[in-house]
Amino acid sequence: MGKVTTGAGVLVKSLKSHGIDTVFALPGAQLDPLFDAFYAERKSLRVIHTRHEQGAAYMALGYAQSTGQEAVCAVVPGPGVLNAGAGLLTAYSNGAKVLCLGGQIPSHAIDKGVGLLHEMYDQKGTMAATTKWQTRIGNPEEAPAVIEEAFRQMNIGRQRPVFVEMAPDIMATEIELDVADPNQDYEVMQPDPDLIEQAAALLGNAENPAIFVGGGIFGAEQELLELAEMLQAPVFMSAAGRGAVDDRHDLAQNMIGAAHQWPKVDAALAVGTKFLPPIFRWGWDDDVKLVRVDPDPDQSIDKWQPDVHLVAHGKPSLAGLANRVSRHNRSRQSRKEEWRDLKHAADRELAETLPGLYAYGDALRAELPEDGIVCFGVTQMGFYSWFGFPTYHPRTNLQAGIQGTLGYSFPTALGAQVANPDKKVVCVTGDGGFMFASNELSTAIRHGINLVTIVFNNGAFGNVKSNQIEDYGGRLIGWDLANPDFVKYAESFGAIGLRATTPEELRTALRKAFSVSRPVVIDVPFEELVDWRPLQHAYRMRGGI
């Protein structure tokens, strides 16, 4: 038998056996045995305690988004689990591998309605809305197998977060148990060879093929570029897919370019993306053939079923297509100049529509190392980044995705900085979003997370104000904010506070921020209200659907 430990000790050893060396957590009564187990493993397991469960979940998300690896957060039951919900829902939408460990009330009272601290009826069932898989560890002996299955669930099919709960009495139960090395040979979903042949023929015979990618593309970047070059097909990257192809490559295009090119496309390959702009904005007709690659068989909308749906992971699917397209591919000349012109046209449109934000984006790009990571919040600068901000490497442009929640960028960027201590990481946020989670400056100081944060400060929920001006005749309500002095606010935590009022001053501030080993907040007053929505080209270009 093994050394005497507790259920929580077995749980922690199981996490370590899967390579986990960091946990983002917030302590509380039902997690006391777990934190005691963390203490026992403190030499090889870093516990970053946060100021809010939202912060713990988002930090785990940032760790996962920036690395593609699994990340762990731990929170108390009931309100703690619900507080983590926004981060988990965002992880779910972005396909991030986050394991949330939830506490519980004592096992004899679960779902009995007896009125214990943090009690919530059907907590595990509630988490089905924000996680892919949920379970409870019912006795200490189950912990290794449950954690092994949790990691398997995060890695098979569509990658998404999972939830495991454990009652404090089960955590505290003593046990003698050795934790064996887990099986980490996860199934990769392979494409149907016959469907690969059909898709290869469809794409190879197309005159104007195009490739659309989202966050599900990562891990298949090499295969993507090989296929794109064979087809001379532009790669249109959604916000979530930025960096799949280096933006300096002629085939790397943004979604403004996609709107310009869409009327000409006769075959589209969609990989790891919801493919929403063509479906809901630009129109569709029978002249467009669609090949979809996604491990989720339910990803397609009934009305727009693909001609070929490869229910498989991206890497083997794109490798298979590259192997078979050569049998069908028409003779293709280089279209480098055409794609370069398309890129320049999209860039001009962006610069003319959002000149102020474009200039600040250029300033940030000029100072950030090419492998630096930026986490963009849901702010006007964040909307600019959906189309602009050149991105050179995978997983270096982090976005909230379809949840679009304020409060995402700052704690998520902290998690990315923890996961990438040797890289420069920058949070770009608005003043509204920053104040959702700015209490985590305390976490940054306490744990030495030397993140650089840029706060674009207009004293408003800027997008709300802009929409009310554009769409509701200037009837303004609920938009104005009372903010602290962000320089002094940062300094009050022990961080460095700076202010920049022009793009040139931002470059100077960034150089200083990157030269110090402390968290830095840069306040950027930005009064200009912009309407970024024309960049979506939200009108029908073809078809009547």
Image: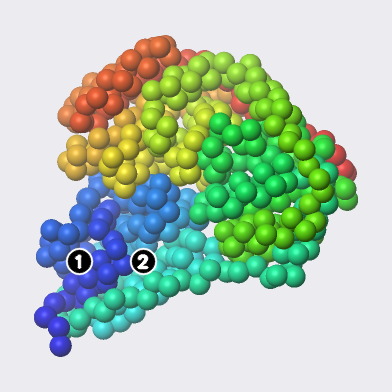
Density class for disc 1 (Cα within 10 Å; few <14, some 14-19, many ≥20) is many
Above or below: residue 394 compared with residue 193? above
Amino acid of disc 1: Leu
Amino acid of disc 2: Met
Q: Nearer the viewer, residue 158 or 8?
A: 158
Side of 143 where 95 appears, left or right: right
Q: Nearer the viewer, residue 340 or 357?
A: 340
Side of 352 where 14 appears, left or right: left
Label 1 SS: helix
| Quadrant of the frame with the N terminus | bottom left
Residue under pointer 1: 34
Q: Nearer the viewer, residue 365 or 305?
A: 365
Q: Which quadrant of the figure has residue 240?
A: top right
Above or below: residue 97 compared with residue 151? above
Point 66% across, 50% down: residue: 227
Label 2 SS: loop
Point 56% across, 41% down: residue: 245
Seen as rendered, the residue at the extreme bottom is: 1
Q: Position of residue 91 (x, y in %)?
A: 46, 53
Q: Position of residue 445 (x, y in %)?
A: 19, 37
Point 11% across, 80% down: residue: 4
Q: Position of residue 109 (x, y in %)?
A: 29, 77
Chain-order first, disc 2 or disc 1: 1
Tell me if I can see residue 81 in this picture.
no
Density class for disc 2 (Cα within 10 Å; few <14, some 14-19, many ≥20) is many
Point 64% across, 53% down: residue: 271
Q: CA distance from mark 2 to mark 1?
A: 20 Å
Q: Which mark is residue 120?
A: 2
